Amino acid sequence: MNKEKSIEALQFFTTGLTNGAFVHKVQGQILKSAGFNKLSDKYLSHYDEEMDWVTKFIDRILDLGGEVKVEDRQAVALVADPVEYVKCDLQRQTEGLEILRKCVAEVHDDPTTYDLLKAYLKDEEDDLYWSETAVELIGKLGEQNWLLTQL
Ligand SMILES: [Fe+2]
Ligand SMILES: [Fe+2]
């Protein structure tokens, strides 16, 4: 198996997911201060969930004898409008899943890392389905009615 490839993939998601999770955290606080408590709780718990994955990635890098790096994070534009944010997150998730699917395939010769990234992929797919359903509901109920369900 190619250890370096596994470590590289795990580091990529350690940095990328830390950044993505932190966006959920800040967006969650923005939504909370605007009174959308239910939607806020969704994103804040999402932050915890994603940081649990980061913990697992870090542990796996260390188990492989690799060195974990704390890397610069990319600037991300925040979106104050709840509906716009859900749509924007759906877009980001769709792009992220494509990258993740490719990375999972690349570590197939390391079953432990493969299983870990595959489990994470499944989790991210579930998040994507949640966002898709939310966008569908916004279309069916109308923005105002949907927002009432997120207080
Ligand atoms: Fe996410
Ligand atoms: Fe997620």
Image (cartoon, rainbow, N blue to C red):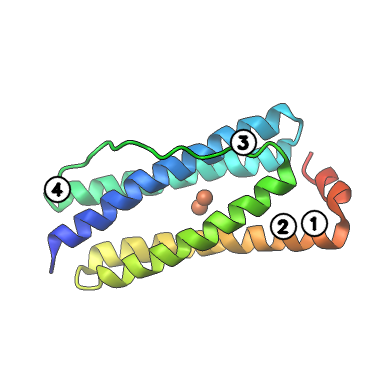
Q: Report the side of 117 relative to 95 (left or right).
A: left
The tag earlier along the polypeptide, 4 or 1, is: 4
Give the residue pinned by disc 2: 134
Q: Position of residue 125 (x, y in %)?
A: 52, 64
The residue lying at 27 percent from left, 70 percent from top is: 106
Give the numbered dot on residue 66: 4
Q: How much space separates mark 4 and mark 1, taking CA atoms?
A: 45 Å
| Label 3 crowd bin: few (<14), some (14–19), many (20+), radius 10 Å | many
Report helix, strand or loop for mark 4: loop
The tag earlier along the polypeptide, 2 or 4, is: 4
Q: Report the side of 95 relative to 64 (left or right).
A: right
Give the residue pinned by disc 3: 28
Instruction: Name the amino acid type tagged 3.
Output: Gly
Q: Position of residue 20 (x, y in %)?
A: 47, 44
Indicate which label's residue lies in the foreground, 4 or 1: 1
The residue lying at 13 percent from left, 69 percent from top is: 1
Q: Examine the rendered structure and indicate whether residue 91 appears above or below residue 20.
A: below
Contact, mark 2 vs mark 1 (Cβ under 8 Å):
yes
Q: Position of residue 60 (x, y in %)?
A: 23, 51
The residue lying at 39 percent from left, 49 percent from top is: 53
Instruction: Name the amino acid type tagged 4.
Output: Gly
Give the residue pinned by disc 1: 138
Q: How much space separates mark 2 and mark 1, taking CA atoms?
A: 6 Å
**Would you identify the image quadrant in which residue 36 lies?**
top right
Contact, mark 2 vs mark 3 (Cβ under 8 Å):
no
